[in-house]
Image (cartoon, rainbow, N blue to C red):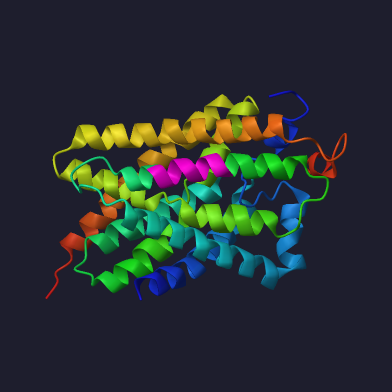
Amino acid sequence: MGERVSEPEQRRVDPDVDLAVPADRAELPAHPAAVLAAVSAGGVLGALARAGLSAALPHDPTGFPWPTFAVNLSGCLLIGVLMAVLAKRANPPVLARPFLGVGVLGGYTTFATHAVEARQLASDGAATTALAYLAATLAGALLAVWVGYAATDRLTPSVSGTGAGQRRVRR
Amino acid sequence: MTALLVALGAAVGAPLRYLADRAVQDRFGARFPWGTLTVNVAGSLLLGFLLGLPLPPAAGALLGTGLCGALTTYSTSSYETLSLATAGRFRPAVANAFLGVAAAVAAAALGHLAATALPWP
């Protein structure tokens, strides 16, 4: 990643909402109903997609939890894509991040299910599978975010030379 | 019916994560992603507890798949770790990654233990 394009990454830590980013801080007081409705509606779509995928990919409860693994890695790839697209836009739509990032992808991926699956595997005597699952999810998810961000960053033209999306997050 | 319950739970879980994240950052600042870490650990504790109870499948769909699933997030947490790392803040990045997983699994185990230790009739 080049120096210029990595700027938003360096400033924004939390893609859901980062109070160090003035636009994030202002969005809830400015449009509380719209922001919360967008997050809620996105969360419903994301959770339904996760539930559908989990039902379509039944797995052996004593084996590697592939459905959750697939959900979390694909969601991580997509958050990388989304944040790279938004960073390139001069003025991204106000509800794009709350709806797609906080809502859809946040509702689609899950930390709790992954934690209880690992606990269940360990208590069933499959501690090695549990550890492998936790490690594979952690490493795979980071790689997926990076691939999603870096590939999108290379393939997406900037809307303008230095977009407001980048200035916005500077102090 | 199951889909409706999942949707209802998620409709509450996702905005709850957003509001909790903001509240934690308001209190503890935004330099380290404590907000996301907090919701992930809280959601794992709750889901561990719920799965230790003799719950009907409908309650599992509403509170487990819907509420806890949407309250917690892996995508946000991973993005934060990568974001910290690309900013050259390697120690917070490693701490976020490993603390997040360790605390969530410990919370899930604790929740499950608490539920199974309760004297159910």
The x and y percentages for residue A76 are 51, 41
- Please determine whether, in this image, residue B32 is positioned above or below residue A52: above
Residue A5 is a magenta residue: no
Q: Residue furthest right?
A: A161
The x and y percentages for residue B99 are 42, 37
User: What quarter of the picture does the N terminus of chain A occupy?
Assistant: top right
- Please determine whether, in this image, residue B56 is positioned above or below residue B44: below
Q: Residue furthest front?
A: A56
- Magenta segment, principal secondary structure? helix
Residue A48 as seen in the image, left or right of residue A161: left
Say which quarter of the image contains residue A3.
top right
Residue A29 as seen in the image, left or right of residue A164: left
The x and y percentages for residue B22 are 62, 57
Number of marks in picture = 0
Residue under the image location 21 percent in, 55 percent down:
B113
Q: Which residues are magenta?
A: A70-78
The x and y percentages for residue B82 are 57, 32
Residue A73 is a magenta residue: yes
- Please determine whether, in this image, residue A16 is positioned above or below residue A125: below
Q: Nearer the viewer, residue B85 or A106?
A: A106
Q: Is residue A55 visible?
A: yes
User: What quarter of the picture does the C terminus of chain A occupy?
Assistant: top right
